[in-house]
Image (tube, rainbow, N blue to C red):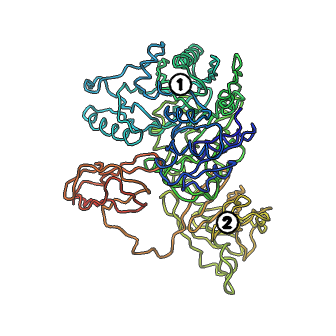
Amino acid sequence: MIRSLLVANRAEIARRIVRTCRDLGIATVAVHSDADSDAPHAREADAAVRLPGDAPADTYLRGDLLVKAALAAGADAVHPGYGFLSEHADFARAVRAAGLVWVGPPPEAMEAMASKTRAKEIMRKAGVPLLDPLDPAEVTARDLPVLVKAATGGGGRGMRVVRELAALPAELGSARAEAASAFGDGEIFVEPYMEGARHVEVQVLADTHGTVWTLGTRDCSLQRRHQKVIEEAPAPGLDGELRHTLAESAANAARAIGYEGAGTVEFLVSPSGRAYFLEMNTRLQVEHPVTEEIHGLDLVALQLRIAEGERLGAEPPAPRGHAVEARLYAEDPSRDWRPQTGILHRLEIPGLRVDSGPDGGDVIGVHYDPMLAKVIAVAPTRAEAVRRLAHGLERARIHGPVTNRELLVRALRHPEFEAGRMDTGFLERHLPELTTDAPDNDEAVPLAALAAALADAARRPATVAGRLGGWRNVPSQPQLRSYRAEPGGTEHEVRYRLTRDGLLAEGLSEVRLLTAEPGRAAEPGRAADPGGAVEPGRVAEPGRVAEPGRVAEPGRVAEPGRVADPARVVLDVAGVRRTFEVTAYGDRRYVDTPQGGHVFTALPRFPDPTARTEPGSLLAPMPGTVVRVAEVAVGDRVEAGQPLLWLEAMKMEHRVTAPAAGVLTALHAAPGRQVEVGALLAVVAAEE
C-alpha cells in the first residue's frame, strides 16, 4: 500500500494528484523550484522539498534531486504527472532502484515509445495502421505538404509543416535545432502532412494482470502550434466501425509493449475516415478530465491502485453524456500566441470543473508552460456541453495577464465547431475572425469604457466644494477619460456629464445611470486584493487593499451629485438594465459583464514624451532567453519578415523578424542572453 507519495511535478497536475491522494488517505510530498516557492501545489501538499534554482533543467528535470527528495521526506512512491520526466525511462529506473514505487508504465514500455520512429516500427508489426515515413533527401514537390517532426519529446516542439520544397532544408535544420535544445536529441523524421485530418486519441488503462481497458475516444483537433487547445469526449462524428478500429488498434498497441497504467494512443483520422497511428504517450494526458467525466472515473486513483497491484474489472464503465475541455493560457493569440506574464489577480470560473495551476494573487513567470487552467463542462449532449463551456468562460472573472479566453469562446461558438466539423488546421484557418476586435457599431466596448470612467469617478473622493463624488456641478463641462482596450487595441475617449436630468454620454444614446447602495466590506479575517480575497493565512502584499464590496438593489435613476459605486456600475441601455463589475489594479481596469469581460488601460492626460524608441527598433516582446541568432551582421541588408533571432519563453520558441526591408544597424542579441520585456534586441533602418 502506498502511504506517502512524492509528486514529481508542479502546477495544475501536481494539485490534481494531491487532491486524489487526499481522498484516498495518502500523504503527499511536493517539490518546488525557487520560482514556485509559494505556488499552490507546494502549499497544498503535506510536505514540500525545495529544488534550488528556477529553470526546469536545474529543478524539475533533475531526476537525482527528485529521488533524494522522496527519500528525505519519507515517501514510498513517485508520481511523475505529465511533461518533465514523466516519459523518461531512466528516471523510472532510478525511482525503482531507490526502493520506491513508480506510478507509471514499465521503463521498457516507455523506451519502446520514446522514439516515434522506433514506435512506428513496433506498431507496424502489431498491425496498427500508420503513415509511411519519407526520406528527407528524396522529397519532391509531389509529396508536399510534409510534416517535419522531432523523433522524441512532444508538445509541438520540433514540428514544422512544409509546403514549399525550397523551404525544406531550412525547416529541417530549424526543427533539428529546436528538438536538440528541448529534448537533448536532434533526431527528426518526415512524413506526409494530411490536410483536413482530425486528431483523435484513445485512453488506455492496463493493470499488471493482463487486463487492458480502452476508454472511448477524445477529439483534440483544435490546436495551436501543434499543441491542443480544446478537447472533447467522445470524439464526434465517428461511425461504429471506425470507433472499433481505433479501440482495437489502441489495445493492440498497449499489449505489444507490455503496457501498465494509464496511457494514450494518438491517431490521425483522414477526411475519408481512415485512421493512422501517430504516437503513444506513456503517461497521463492533460486532457484526461473529459474521459473521467463521461466514464465516472478518477484516472489518478486508478493509476495508484494499479501501481499497488490491484486488478481492473473485466470491462470499464460505459460512457454517459459528453464533456468538453478548454485550456486557458496566458497568451495573446492575436500576436503569434505570445506568452504573457505578471500577477494573476483573480481567477473565478463558477459552475464548471476548473483544474488550475495558479490561484488569484500568484505570479505567472517566464520559466514554465503558460497554461493557467483547464475548464471542463459536461452535459447529456455535445451541444449542451459546448454551450455550458462557452457561457462559463464568458462569465469568468480573469484579471491579470492577457489570456486566450475570447478565442476559446468564439471557437466554441463557431458554426463549424458546433457542427462537429473541425480538423487540426481549424485555428490557423479561422484565426483572423477569432481574434478580430468587435465591429465599430458594437456598443459593448464603449459601454464598458463608460462604466470604467464612472467607477473611476466614484473612486475619487470629493475634494472641494462643488465637486461631488467625481463630477462637477457644471453641466456645460463634460468629464473626460481616455482608455486603451487591451491587448493593444483602440483608444476610447469617454465624455459624459451628470446633470440634474441624468447621465449624458457622448456617442451613446438612451443610456441612464442607475444608482446602487454602498458595497459590502471584505469578510473578516481575509486580506483581499482588488479582485478577490486572498486565502486565509496568506499576508496581503504591500499596497493591496480589500476589494470594494458588491452592490445591491439597482433600479433608481442616479440623483444629482451621485455617481456609480467603484466596484459596480448599473446602466439602463435603451430600457435594458446592464451590470458592469469594475476592478482597478494600478492603471488597469477590468470590466466584467454577463456577456464577457473587457480590459482597459487608463491613459494619462499628458503622455510621457520620453517613452519613445528609435524607428525600426525590435524590442523583446516578453522576458526570455535568446536561443539562436540568424547568420546576419550589422550592416547587412535584410528583407521584411526575415528571421533575425529566436527567443525561448514558457516552453515555446518565438521568431523575431525584420519589420521591413532595410539595413541592420544594431544587433544586441547573443545565444544564451537573458532579456527582459522591452529590451532592445536589434535595429533595422528601413529603406526610403
- Quadrant where the N terminus sits is top right
Residue 488 lies, with reference to residue 385, above or below; the image says: below
**Observer-nearest of 4 and 34:** 4
Q: Amino acid at mark 2?
A: Ala
**Observer-nearest of 62 and 141:** 62
Residue 637: image location, x then y, percent: 20, 54
525 sits to left or right of 250 = right
Crowd around label 1: few <14 · some 14–19 · many ≥20 (10 Å): many
Look at mark 1 in the image and give the residue it sits on: 265
**Observer-nearest of 642 and 7:** 7
Q: Quadrant of residue 263?
A: top right
188 sits to left or right of 687 = right
Instruction: Tell me if I can see residue 386 in this picture.
Output: yes
Residue 145 lies, with reference to residue 643, above or below; the image says: above
Local secondary structure at mark 1: strand
Local secondary structure at mark 2: loop
- Quadrant where the C terminus sits is bottom left
Look at mark 2 in the image and give the residue it sits on: 540
Residue 556 lies, with reference to residue 639, above or below; the image says: below
Q: Quadrant of residue 120?
A: top left
Instruction: Tell me if I can see residue 391 in this picture.
Output: no
**Observer-nearest of 212 and 92:** 92
Residue 349 lies, with reference to residue 682, above or below; the image says: above
Residue 193: image location, x then y, percent: 39, 27
Residue 296: image location, x then y, percent: 72, 29
Name the N-terminal-most of marks 1 and 2: 1
Crowd around label 2: few <14 · some 14–19 · many ≥20 (10 Å): some
